[in-house]
Image (cartoon, rainbow, N blue to C red):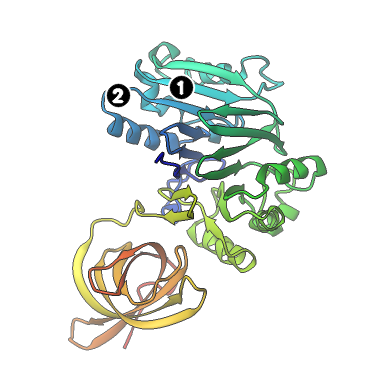
């Protein structure tokens, strides 16, 4: 039987500018880039932010000397959506071939995307000129309201509300539907209806949630972005299955995004916050989300007794005794009888011995990044990344 599973991977989830900050490392600091691969191996890239560099490295590692072909859907020409282009290594290999799609900008005229590519590699902005990009390149200009097919995947476009123009894309693949609707500000009826049409019944809805609802109503009004609350309203209206908050603000640290996610999940249970390394699989069985590539650092194989409290996949609170099997400064791996929901919060109270051999309790907060079958029978192995706040690192007698 043909493979109908579609895979989606987030390589860059940040908006406006890259943020290599300590406070943003959990969700990631690279700008917008999303990979979609259908069951027959057709590759799509949604936007070309700095996350594209990591994607290119992975593709080269996997392909070896084999040719790479992909379809690149660019939403618009702001820096955070194109600045990864000069650092995508597969562009520099002549056996590869890429098909680019975007719109004609009134500021750039015909062949807008080709002009953007040339300008990025023009002197004095970059030391390597366009002649070094030896991969085959084809450009197609599309507008809002178009529909076309690529190897069995139907691509639909709609105009979104963003300064200088922006396209939203819908990919109806054999495995399910993926809607990519970043850089959009709600409130204009024409564009709001465009987005509802694009997102209707989506299995995966990737939605601009850069602002808080308060910012959107005041200081960020007119900036061309949305909030977690507007994304939730949209997901409910169009009956989407899963909502992924995307295009995190450069000034939103991990704790802020945690807050947006928590608030959104109270209104729409199938909400996720897009994170670098997050993987989605879509097929006839539904949507499966994993985050196995999260950066937790080298493990240290230790065993600590702990008390763990959190929220299970069934939405119910639990508390149990557990064993912490591995731990780093960034996270831990532990075995539980319960199965907590991904991206839910866990409270760990680890029993440790102080230097004077008096027992003490170390209280830590973490967020669940993956789960798997544990070596122990009827147990689930849980990966946790620690959340820094004023409580972290305190001990109690």
Examine the image and state in which quarter residue 232 appears.
bottom right
Residue 218 visible to the viewer: no
Left or right of 79 in this view: 280: left
Percent coordinates x, y for residue 33 in the rendering: 49, 38
Q: Earlier in the sequence, mark 2 or mark 1?
A: 2
Residue at 45% across / 55% down in the picture? 289
- Determine whether 306 is above or below 82 in the image: below
- Determine whether 106 is above or below 393 in the image: above
Dot 1 falls on a residue whose secondary structure is: strand
Examine the image and state in which quarter residue 341 appears.
bottom left
Q: Quadrant of the N terminus?
A: top left
C-alpha span from label 2 to label 1: 14 Å
Q: Which residue is mark 1?
A: 98
Examine the image and state in which quarter residue 371 appears.
bottom left
Percent coordinates x, y for residue 77 in the rendering: 60, 28
Residue at 61% across / 15% down in the picture? 111
Left or right of 363 in this view: 148: right
Percent coordinates x, y for residue 139 in the rendering: 55, 18
Residue at 57% across / 44% down in the picture? 177
Residue sitting at the far top: 131
Q: Residues within 10 Å of mark 1 (few under 14, many from 20)?
A: some
Left or right of 298 in this view: 16: right
Residue 186 visible to the viewer: yes
Residue at 74% across / 43% down in the picture? 222
Q: Residues within 10 Å of mark 2 (few under 14, many from 20)?
A: few
- Determine whether 350 is above or below 211 in the image: below
Dot 2 falls on a residue whose secondary structure is: loop
Q: Which residue is mark 2?
A: 66
Q: Nearer the viewer, residue 83 or 75?
A: 75
Percent coordinates x, y for residue 180 in the rendering: 59, 42
């Amino acid at each position: 039987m043909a493979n109908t599973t579609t895979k989606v991977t987030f390589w860059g989830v940040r908006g406006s500018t890259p943020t290599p900050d300590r406070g943003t490392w959990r969700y990631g600091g690279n700008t917008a880039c999303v990979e979609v691969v259908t069951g027959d191996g057709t590759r799509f890239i949604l936007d070309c932010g700095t996350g594209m560099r990591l994607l290119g490295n992975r593709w080269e590692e996997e392909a070896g000397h084999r040719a790479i072909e992909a379809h690149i859907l660019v939403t618009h020409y702001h820096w955070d959506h194109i600045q990864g282009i000069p650092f995508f290594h597969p562009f520099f290999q002549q056996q590869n071939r890429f098909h680019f799609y975007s719109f004609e900008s009134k500021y750039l005229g015909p062949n807008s995307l080709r002009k953007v590519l040339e300008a990025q590699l023009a002197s004095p902005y970059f030391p390597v000129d366009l002649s070094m990009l030896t991969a085959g390149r084809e450009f197609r200009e599309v507008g809002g309201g178009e529909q076309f097919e690529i190897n069995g995947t139907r691509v639909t476009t709609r105009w979104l509300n963003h300064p200088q123009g922006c396209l939203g894309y819908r990919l109806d693949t054999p495995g399910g539907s993926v809607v990519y609707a970043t850089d959009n500000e709600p409130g204009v009826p024409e564009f709001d209806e465009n987005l509802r049409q694009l997102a209707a019944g989506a299995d995966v809805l990737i939605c601009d949630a850069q602002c808080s609802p308060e910012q959107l109503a005041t200081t960020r009004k007119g900036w061309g972005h949305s909030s977690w609350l507007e994304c939730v309203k949209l997901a409910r209206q169009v009956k989407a299955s899963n909502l992924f908050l995307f295009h995190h603000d450069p000034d939103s640290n991990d704790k802020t995004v945690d807050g947006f996610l928590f608030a959104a999940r109270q209104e729409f249970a199938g909400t996720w916050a897009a994170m670098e390394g997050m993987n989605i699989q879509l097929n006839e069985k539904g949507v499966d989300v994993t985050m196995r590539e999260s950066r937790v650092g080298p493990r240290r194989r230790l065993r600590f007794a702990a008390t763990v409290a959190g929220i299970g996949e069934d939405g119910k609170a639990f508390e149990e005794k557990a064993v912490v099997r591995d731990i780093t400064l960034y996270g831990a791996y532990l075995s539980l009888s319960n199965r907590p929901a991904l991206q839910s919060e866990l409270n760990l109270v680890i029993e440790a011995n102080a230097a004077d051999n008096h027992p003490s309790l170390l209280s830590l907060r973490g967020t669940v990044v993956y789960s798997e079958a544990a070596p122990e029978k009827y147990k689930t192995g849980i990966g946790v990344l620690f959340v820094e706040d004023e409580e972290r690192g305190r001990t109690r007698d």
